[in-house]
Amino acid sequence: MKFARLAVLSLLFFSAAALAAPAKDSTIKELMKVVKTRKLMDGMRAQMNVLMDNSVKAALHGKTPNAKQEAAIDKMKKRIVALLDDELSWKRFEPLSIKLYKETFTEEELQGMLKFYQTPAGQAVINKMPTLMQKTMIAVQGMTQDMEPQLQQIEDDFQRDMAAANAKAK
């Protein structure tokens, strides 16, 4: 008897889940417009420039690059920016986002998100999230810089262990 009840409940549960309306492209596009996804992507690409500059400074260990090194750095940065602009273009990103939203959310969930993001609190999240993300990235970058000596020690130990392992294998 318990098995029959469990089977009926399972059927009802899975049937309800299966009946959830699939997400519509139009709702996803509206949500992405409301949350300013395209503007957020543009901001992320701009932040990549800051990250590249910080990475180059860290790699230089406080040394000032000469003119040829500066030219090489500029060339590398331009190539990376061009690659990111192409690979992360809206033309490529929008269809991927729609696909992922459809795989992840139901129409009902998207409608709920739309309602929230159209409220003052939702707009505050949208408008303040880039600042929060930038502050988080800077904080994490600082944390990873603090770990640099330990990471270097781990890498040195690994190289020594691998050299010893290779010597024993011969």
Image (cartoon, grey):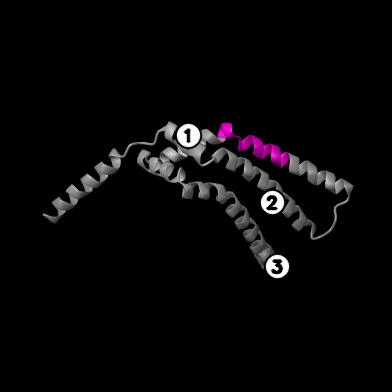
Rendered residue at 57%/38% (across/down)? 38
Crowd class of label 1 (few under 14; some 14 to 19; many from 20; radius 10 Å): some
Q: Mark 1 or mark 3, which has the lower sequence index?
A: 1
Q: Which residues are magenta?
A: 79-92
92 vs 71, left or right, is left
How far across and how far down the image is residue 64, in percent? 85, 55
124 vs 139, left or right, is left
In reply to whether residue 7 is colored magenta, the answer given is no
How far across and how far down the image is residue 7, in percent? 18, 49
Rendered residue at 21%/45% (across/down)? 12
Disc 2 element: helix
Disc 3 designates what residue?
Answer: 149
Disc 1 designates what residue?
Answer: 29
Main secondary structure along the magenta-highlighted residues? helix
Comparing labels 1 and 3, the label whose residue is closer to the camera = 1
Of residues 168 and 112, the one drawn nearer to the viewer in this rendering = 112
Crowd class of label 2 (few under 14; some 14 to 19; many from 20; radius 10 Å): some
- Disc 1 versus disc 2: distance between alpha carbons? 30 Å
